[in-house]
Image: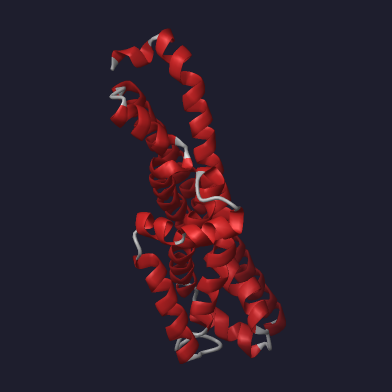
């Protein structure tokens, strides 16, 4: 495995590693974007319609929760094979990068919905009740209370979601989608080029560490900023009350 430090190795496999890493990033980015487009509203609906939500609806919440649980319980490989026809109908193919996007989105959206539900459930109920008492509509409460208050938790949840989707991307690559998973299978396993397998593992670990580090710092930064803004609001409110008393 020492040959990964040689010029010959990188001259032979460097362009291939670069290409497959780029494919992995494309699948990760596009599928994460569309999975959040679907999963974020689903998570919001789960919170709004539960027993303690601002629009409780037991039947709707139960049905939606059951559908999401079914989506989460299916192993990605089985789901990918099961919706081949649907994938081909949507994007025209079930192989390659395009063919991987649909099953990645279908598999990740339910996971993201639960992550969003968990984040929004942490929002202080008193803040929500205060917004309701002022006549705010459900949409306004979601936009101005739930989402802003839950941003730090949502950001941390996003890092977990992205890392999970990255694992799905690696699996998709092993069954014809391309990317680092495909590279590890073809060269690391079938052709016994252990050096390529080692580099793909290192690249995946680096990607995970970058995502975890960036989103953790971002969440901490946002949390500190929100705490500072809340403190200023409380101070202004206290000062205003003091002036009125005088």
- Residue at figure coordinates x 44%, y 60% from the top left: 107
Among the 4 quarters of the image, the one containing residue 41: bottom right
Q: Is residue 115 above or below residue 132?
A: above
Indicate the position of residue 151 as horizontal and vertical percent values: 55, 62
Quadrant in the picture for the N terminus: top left
Q: Which corner quadrant of the image does residue 212 belong to?
A: top left
**Residue sitting at 42 percent across and 9 percent down?**
8
Q: Nearer the viewer, residue 229 or 158?
A: 158
Which residue is nearer to you in this view: 206 or 227? 206
Q: Quadrant where the C terminus lies?
A: bottom right
Residue 33 sits above or below residue 207 on the image: below
- On the image, the x and y values in percent for residue 145 come to 60, 74
Q: x, y (%) of residue 196? A: 36, 24
- Give the image quarter of residue 237: bottom right
- In this picture, residue 172 sits left or right of residue 40: left
Looking at the picture, does residue 207 appear above or below residue 109? Answer: above
Can residue 152 be seen by looking at this rendering? Answer: no
x, y percent for residue 141: 63, 78
Write the residue at 49% across / 73% down: 123
Q: Is residue 22 left or right of residue 157?
A: right
Residue at image coords 53%, 29%? 19
Residue 48: tell me if it is visible: yes
């Amino acid at each position: 495995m020492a040959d990964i430090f040689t010029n010959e190795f990188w001259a032979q496999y460097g362009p291939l590693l670069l290409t497959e890493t780029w494919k992995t990033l494309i699948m990760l980015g596009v599928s994460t974007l569309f999975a959040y487009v679907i999963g974020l509203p689903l998570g919001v609906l789960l919170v709004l319609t539960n027993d303690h939500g601002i629009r409780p609806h037991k039947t709707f919440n139960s049905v939606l929760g059951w559908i999401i649980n079914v989506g989460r319980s299916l192993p990605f490989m089985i789901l990918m094979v099961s919706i081949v026809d649907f994938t081909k109908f949507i994007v025209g193919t079930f192989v390659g990068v395009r063919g991987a996007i649909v099953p990645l989105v279908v598999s990740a959206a339910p996971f993201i919905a639960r992550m969003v539900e968990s984040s929004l459930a942490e929002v202080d109920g008193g803040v929500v009740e205060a917004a309701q008492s002022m006549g705010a509509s459900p949409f306004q409460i979601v936009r101005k209370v739930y989402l802003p208050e839950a941003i730090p938790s949502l950001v941390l949840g996003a890092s977990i979601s992205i890392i999970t989707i990255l694992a799905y991307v690696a699996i998709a690559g092993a069954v014809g989608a391309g990317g680092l998973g495909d590279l590890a299978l073809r060269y690391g396993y079938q052709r016994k080029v252990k050096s390529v397998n080692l580099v793909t593992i290192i690249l995946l670990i680096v990607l995970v560490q970058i995502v975890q580090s960036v989103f953790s710092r971002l969440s901490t930064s946002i949390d500190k900023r929100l705490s500072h803004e809340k403190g200023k609001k409380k101070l202004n409110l206290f000062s205003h009350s003091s002036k009125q008393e005088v």
